[in-house]
Image (cartoon, rainbow, N blue to C red):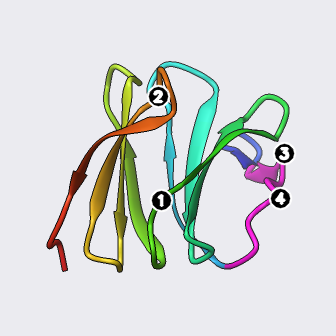
Amino acid sequence: LWDTTTARPTQTLKGHTATVYGVCFQPDGPLVATVSFDWTCKLWDARQAKVVKSLEGHQDDIIGVDMSPSSRLLATGSDDGTCCIWDLRNWKPASVLQGHL
């Protein structure tokens, strides 16, 4: 993570075991979501640079991530052809959309 005022790094988020391919920030809070070629999405507390939750379920590289304005839902898209909509209140998939290639 970088300080936009000084253009210097402030935190390094370590935890993925393969290339990180996407990132999004919680619109009104401290969460940062990262997706990786290790097939996981990790949610981080940016204040402490610690993993809050690791979401698993895709069967291939995860190549996209975005969070809803309400911070209740998170979407991840994967090379496995699925898009998972995660409910961040219980950390479970609310929906899995098939056939997205």
Residue 97 image offset from top left, x and y in percent: 19, 57
Mark closer to the observer (1, 3): 1
Q: Which residue is drawn at 19% across and 80% down?
A: 101
User: Which residue bears the numbered disc 4?
Assistant: 14
Amino acid at the residue labelled 3: Thr
Mark closer to the observer (2, 1): 1
- N-terminal label among 4 and 1: 4
Q: In this view, does 65 lie above or below 63?
A: above
Q: Tell which of 29 and 79 is nearer to you.
A: 79
User: Which residue bears the numbered disc 1?
Assistant: 57
Q: In this view, does 67 lie above or below 23?
A: above
State the mark number for residue 68. Answer: none
Mark 4 and mark 2: Cα distance apart in space? 21 Å
Count numbered badges in the picture. 4
Q: Tell which of 37 and 46 is nearer to you.
A: 37
Q: In which quarter of the image is residue 94?
A: top left
Q: In this view, does 92 lie to the left or right of 94?
A: right
- N-terminal label among 2 and 3: 3
Mark 2 and mark 1: Cα distance apart in space? 15 Å
User: Which residue bears the numbered disc 3?
Assistant: 10
